[in-house]
Amino acid sequence: MHTLQVRPLQRWEAESRGFASPLARKGPWPQEARVESPSASFDGAASEGLTEAQSRLLLETLVACTPVGLAVLDLEQRFVKVNDALAEMNGIPRAAHLGRKVQELLPELWATLRPQYQHILDGGEAKTFEMSGVTPKAAGVERHFLTSYYPMRTASHVLLGIGIIVVEVTEQRRAHEALQASEQRYRSLVEAMAQPVWTTNKRGEVVEPAPRWMAFTGQTHAEHLGLGWLSAIHPEDRKRVVRGWVESLRTRASYRGEFRLKFHAGGYRDVVGRAVPVFDGKGDIREWVSTAEDVTERKQAEALLETERARLHAVLMNAPASIAILSGREQTFTLVNPFYRRLSHGEDLTGISLRSLPPTGDDYSEFLARAFDTGEAQAQKEKPIVADFNGTGDTTRRFDIVYQPLRDVNGQVDSVLSFAIDVTDRVEAREKLEEWAASLRNQQQWLEAVLDRTPVALILMEPHTGRAIFANQAARRMAGGDFPEGLRVERYAGTYLFTDETGRELRSDEVPGVRAARGEPVHGASVVWHTPTGRYSLLVEAAPLSAQHGHPAAVLLAHQDVSELRKTQAQLQHAVSLRDEFLTVASHELKTPLTPLQLKLQSLVRDAQTADTLEALRGRVMRTAESVSGQIRKMTTLINDLLEVTQLTGPAAPLSLEPVDLASVVQEVVERFSAQATRTDSELVIQAASGVVGQWDRHRLEQVVSSLLSNALKYGPGRPVTLTVERLRGMARLSVKDEGIGISPGSLQAIFEKFTRAVSTRHYGGLGLGLFITRQIIEAHQGTLRAESQPGQGATFIVELPVEGPNTRTR
């Protein structure tokens, strides 16, 4: 063990009389103020009664508790030891220093620090100097430090590292500089202030010129001397101001009052006057320093704010929706608009607690309490409410109700806004639309006829292969009557002739159809197609159509013939506009799920005609319903993901923290995914250490594990998935490793953003929200989430959480 010895800093020379801080020196710091030796140890006689463990504990305690920054660097300038005082100076947690280089943590200071380290590394002795610069603790703020560097050597003088002692002297330096400039600053401040400033003697009389006062009020030098300054105060306010001023003179207390003060441009301005007594060394008042703050604009703003409040109140009271505000846990009505009063049978509930009313049997109060307690908006959809809406007796209508928490200036929920809008007409319209589903078959036939007869040549082809699977009449006519369906991109060159406008034959990788088949974007590509029926100048647009509703993925190619339209720029612009408009409509209509509905209807009709028994027909109907329900569940999952994103990116939602065993959470989630793992032929392996317990939100952690496990099964089917739980350096760690397709290095960060995917949507469904939501949950626990992967070698997602919970972790 190597003993580090440090002798006290030599005292600095005292200045002026008595003791003067060395920080008050002018000019550079004295060279005497330095650590003279890197070697020091506790006095041997004083520590004879201590064991080695006690001595070590005593030394560690002294290092941890000293207000002086201490650190040890290795030969690569990495932090090996650092105490809390230095970590606080740097504005970086102590643990974040360890193992990291000074240049990485303090880049702003590196140019200054590097020569000092090099001096020690080159065999130099201890060195002390004053430095200034910026640290992460206060970005952009220059701070001052007295820093000592010394070599740490073994008994044989082998250099092990660099010892550092840092004392922050920012406040002392600033105090010294402020003391030198205080009088000049005061003078400059008085002259530079936009508001009137003046001084009076102890009797309240102006004896020195007050330029700001005269500039503001327009008074002359003679008019404002003595007590003449009082004449600039509005006559209606003057007596009140004089009484308050006399009382302050009598009690020797500061004065504050609001009054109207004459303005040089005419009229009066609202000001807040303040006067503070200045005492001499004997405690007597030497003079009064007074200011007048112009608050005219502020008062106008307050009046405008009050007007806006009144306007908002009028909007709430006259809105065609049921609106009420209920305060506190007692749910006391503080605002009830007429529409809400109608729903409560005309009773004015203002000032009444909802909990004091007879129970109605619904869950209105429960939703209010949930919004108040969680701070999250709650909602009810299509809630039936019975009331006399039109004065003709009770009827039932349906409402969408939102329970929105309202927060006070401190961010605490103090009330809940209940907003209910009548959606009865919308519900009835939806039910009517469901009745019209039977007519969709004719509409689909009409759409197919429109697409087939449109003058724009439309071609649907398979991705990658480029095989045409549909061509409308315009495309077939352009190709010469029969469109060669089933032709792959490799054979395009021997069948089609494509050139540019100059007649140069396009290479295969330049043909728009080949590019689109390979997944490249094609927008307004210009090409000339030579066919048996003629030469066509075309603008080609390509749009990928994802697989949905029973249709395979495809690429839509729209060929706009611009042979004639190129004659004039106006005609071309018109044609492009028509093309873009058509593509928008066509793309939208093609994505409408008409074909699956028609097939389901035809299937049900055939089943109804051929079913032997009602029970057999019922079973077929139930299977069809299950298929439809599956699509609805998928849509519900997507909508829930979008709602989850809205909640996590809004105001911070509170976590329901409790002691949670991470291994238990992982075990429960794995059991829920066992069936899915069986379907994908993936083995789920759990390697969980016991006792990894922390203060976390159990429900949110289940979301995290479910999301990561779902991704592992999706992208690594047929391969094992390993879930590891362990405790490492005071942190709980969960890793989920698969052996699937892996992730490219360029996507390792992007996959955690909204709607970002590392793979094509043609092969893997979803909105690209799962990892974004997972990261938001982990960061809400003040943890971290990262991914490690190489393409084709699987991926490992690593979650680290503080076991003490997010509320107590040092930031």
Image (tube, grey):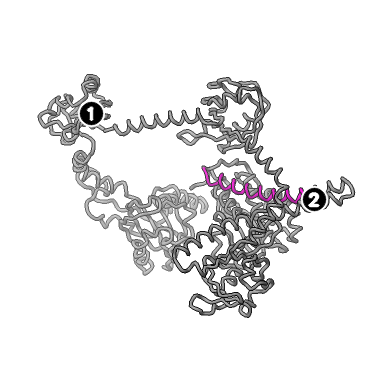
Disc 1/disc 2 C-alpha distance (Å): 85 Å
For mark 2, give the secondary structure. Answer: helix
558 over 632 or under it: above or below: below
Residue range highlighted in magenta? 624-650
- First of labels 1, 2 by sequence position: 1
On the image, the x and y values in percent for residue 296 come to 29, 32
Q: Are marks 1 and 2 in contact (CB under 8 Å)?
A: no
Magenta region includes residue 644 = yes
Query: Tag 2: Cα neighbours inside 10 Å, few (<14), some, or many (≥20)?
Result: some
Q: Which residue is denoted by mark 2 in the rendering?
A: 604
Looking at the picture, tell me which residue is in the foreground, 392 or 694: 392
Left or right of 166: which side holds 444? right
On the image, the x and y values in percent for residue 545 come to 62, 61
Residue 334 visible in the current orientation: yes
On the image, the x and y values in percent for residue 746 come to 54, 65
455 over 287 or under it: above or below: below
Can you name the residue that lies furthest to the left here? Answer: 222
Give the amino acid type for the residue marked by disc 1 in the picture. Answer: Tyr
**Figure quadrant of residue 515:** bottom right
Residue 268, labelled with which disc? 1
Front position among marks 1 and 2: 2
Give the amino acid type for the residue marked by disc 2 in the picture. Answer: Leu
Q: Residue at left 36%, top 61%?
A: 113
Q: Residue at left 64%, top 71%?
A: 466
